[in-house]
Amino acid sequence: MVDLDKPELTAKQLAYLSAYTKNPSALAKDEYFKAFKYHTFTNETKLEKGDDLILKDQNYTTYFTIKNNLIYAIGMSKTSDEFIFYKFDTKVIPNDDYLLIQMEKNRKVKWAEESKLRDVFPLYHDVRIDDIRTALYYLLREEPYKSDKKLMEYAQNMRQKLDRSNIRQLTTELDYFLDLKIDEKAWKYKSDEVLNLKHTSAHALADIYFGSASYKLAEKFFLRSLLDFKLFSAGGSNAQKDANRLIYDLSKVYEKLGKTDEMIGYLIPLLNGNGSIGSATELLNTYIEKNKTDKQSLKKQIDASFETLDNIRGDGTYTFIFNGKVIFFYSVFSKTESSFRKEVTETDFYKSL
């Protein structure tokens, strides 16, 4: 936990650890407390003293407290709903066995392993993915689902908790769920998991096929997730974040397929202030440099696209034409040609062209 690159703790670190485990009230008076750093984190950080002891690194915020010789720590992930709970007795910590150090080492190893899996097996809904089993549980209690032998068989294939690794073996099952007839009105106040079963399945299929370099299939299911099976969310922010990720990933799909117009076109709506300007700008600049794109020509193509904006369904699904290609996107906010133009042309990216 303390300066993990060094084989031994410094005298100040030993003194601090002793105070932490034996007399934590003394920490407020300890000068070293103010300079307590964790050098192995990508971003250096300090242990902060407020109402609680808090450790913040790039992946977790961990809260520490002590009561009756027991130390409690809760590590909250910054990138998912995961949290890690620790509890240990200070009386059983020998002077040469720094449990806190090993605890932090284990967490860092686990995070490194998960990061590798994220690169190999992309899955946007890595936390939500097991909601599929919850949805099946509810469906199979009612007709016509409990009489569907195929659905029952596929549910039996999902006895273990779903994650980014095992979901890749279940593409047949995921595809089957997309054709189920689900009355959204009937389930609206009963189960969000059922309402989102098709979206979660389609989005997972898109990620699976993208990860396996099956880019045409990835395109198909990213579009189905965006157009046919929108994420149901009581608030609009989750639906917007999901849609932003879909069109961002569609841009990467079209890059792999060598479709330059779609590759660039799908990033234009992300310049509209819905939370993805930074990532869209970075990717656009990368594309421009990589493909030696003429900026003046690109600016003319963007300008010509504004007047083609169309709200095709009245449900937040929009299209526009970019250099002859139809681009789809979703927005929880109402768009007009003038508002769309204003949002894009006021960005630093557009002004750089």
Image (cartoon, rainbow, N blue to C red):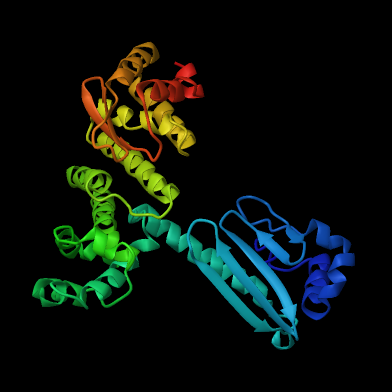
Query: In the picture, residue 49 is in which quadrant?
Result: bottom right
Query: In the picture, residue 47 is in which quadrant?
Result: bottom right
Q: In this view, does 320 lie above or below 54?
A: above
Question: So how many labels did they put on this image?
Answer: 0
The percent position of residue 5, horizontal first and vertical second, equals 65, 61
Residue drawn where x is 73% and y is 66% of the image: 53
Query: In the picture, residue 36 is in which quadrant?
Result: bottom right
Q: Is residue 268 left or right of residue 92?
A: left
The percent position of residue 135, horizontal first and vertical second, equals 28, 69
The percent position of residue 181, horizontal first and vertical second, equals 15, 61
The percent position of residue 71, horizontal first and vertical second, equals 70, 79
Q: Residue furthest bottom?
A: 92
Q: Can residue 149 be seen in this view?
A: yes
| Foreground residue among 166 and 220 | 220
Q: In this view, does 56 lie above or below 214?
A: below
Quadrant including the N terminus: bottom right
| Foreground residue among 34 and 236 | 236
Quadrant including the C terminus: top left
Residue drawn where x is 22% and y is 78% of the image: 141
Residue drawn where x is 39% and y is 41% of the image: 332
Q: In this view, does 303 lie above or below 331?
A: above
| Foreground residue among 86 and 258 | 86
Q: Can residue 164 be seen in this view?
A: no
Q: Is residue 96 left or right of residue 300?
A: right
